[in-house]
Amino acid sequence: MTPNMDEAIEKLPEPKDVTYQRPVKLDDALLMTKFGIYNLCLITISGTILAAVLLETLGISYVLPVAECDLMLTTKEKGILSAISFAGIISSSHLWGFLADTRGRRTVILPTLFLAFASTVLSSFTTNFWLITITRFFTGFFISGSSATIYAYLGEFHAKSNSSRAIMGASFVFGVGCILLPLIAWSVINQEWEYTLPLLNIVYRPWRLFIVVCGLPSLVCGLALLYFPESPKFLFSRGHEQDTIMIMHKMYRWNTGGKGPKLALTSLLQETEAQQTKIRREESANNKSVLRLLKQMWQQTAPLFMGQYLKRTTIICVLQFGIYLTSNGMYMFFPDILNRIAELEDQGVGRTTICQAVYATQVDISQLQQHDVNATALPEVCHQKLDISAYEHSFVLETIYALGFAVIGLIINAVGKLPILVFIFGVCGISGILIVFIDLPLLAIWFYVILLTCGFCISVVNACTVDLFPTNLRAMAVCISLMFGRLGSVVGANIVGFLLDSQCELTFWISGISLIGCGVLSFFIPNIYKRNALEDRISISSR
């Protein structure tokens, strides 16, 4: 370097450090870190985790029709298998939510992602109904950890003014995952290859690979989160001020590319917290007794089922149960039923109802018991591919969901929650009943798609829940209501599994009437006629 260049560099003004001598509020400190690549990475990871939950729970619906002969599945067993992941989520979501609030968000999310992927990989090698049922249960059990916690983790890296934008960004990534699900299924399941694995005594077919592909987002997100710390707000609430400040520095460096003035935070302003809540959290974090932990979990839940909140909790739980009963329960057999209709159309049948197609295309598993299911050549009644129409209509359904949630978000303030709920419940319920009578397959399929869009009401009911409960009960109220919703998924899938082959019409009657009943129940939601400000509405879309 020449002397002239040295002199020129010495004359350049040095960047001034941004120094704060007084303590800064954590929310203000988060704003000082800017909004950039660090935030976008977290938003992408969070949205992918939400999409991973969708793939793990709903992806099995594409597997059931093509794994029928490999696993010797009856329709009843298909119902159980399609619901078992939701049973795993139900059994663990309360536990993970509690541990995330007392032990840490990342502490729960990271290991559960890896465990969910491991369980998914194991399920792809199973050879019978009971083995895949057990492994899919544990997949749901573990994936629930990230599902129940990721909103809090993402939101706590952002100031209040930015948290909604971050969650909406993650929801967009989730929406893309919804649209990609049928495309991923089509690209993997409809391949023509198979490998014999003598050691495991199985033929590895594309549907097994699809199960692994559905678990890959969990693995990728788990690896990505190794490079991200615990939530700064959680650390600060535990008294780790210096660790929180270090996270702020890292966020600032990522967001500015290291080119801005140095951010030098000296300290953070201690925020006040209700003493009772603070003591309870400290006790929970240090408590090793299982019985005491269960007691504290009950103390956080019990108020929802007492006094003035009992009626509110009951209504929202019943509504979510009814929505999930159809939106997830009936969805699990959507690809299978569409595949049966396509099979009948290939045989030259032009006019038929959905249920007539179901009755005419039943596979008698008992006749396959003598067949070697691991043989390369399966009987003609066994399907190794899904008809393209199953993927096309699934893609249309997911696209409608992605656009519909955006539209509802735009009109909910102007229209109000009650008209939206009544309209969706009414239209979907009537569509479910009409399916029984329509003998034009394409028209019946479109009514089936409309029936499944009742899932729009999930976010609207969550918005109602936020309005109905005070701050200290809102998160738990949403958690409990969604637990009842997923219970509805389990019940719905099993109802379809038990009744589809013998009482197909009854399954659609149950869905239609239950949705109309939910529409009527919507009139009894307290304060449903009042319209609150936009900032008071928090909509959580959880299919």
Image (cartoon, rainbow, N blue to C red):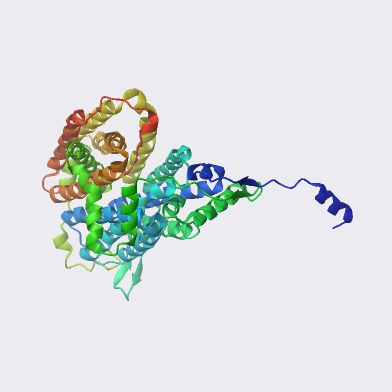
Between residues 92 and 209, which one lies in front from this camera angle? 92
Q: To which quarter of the image does residue 327 belong?
A: top left
In the image, residue 340 lies at what x, y percent?
23, 47
Between residues 311 and 222, which one lies in front from this camera angle? 311
- Residue occupying the point 32% across, 63% down: 119
In the image, residue 528 lies at what x, y percent?
25, 28
Outermost residue, bottom side = 199
Q: To which quarter of the image does residue 541 belong?
A: top left
Query: How many numbered discs, if any?
Result: 0
Instruction: Give the side of residue 118 with respect to residue 362, left or right.
Output: right
In the image, residue 450 lies at what x, y percent?
27, 35
In the image, residue 91 lies at what x, y percent?
23, 56
Confirm whether residue 226 shows in the render: yes
Image quarter hosting the N terminus: bottom right
Between residues 221 and 342, which one lies in front from this camera angle? 221
Between residues 318 and 394, which one lies in front from this camera angle? 318
Confirm whether residue 144 shows in the render: no
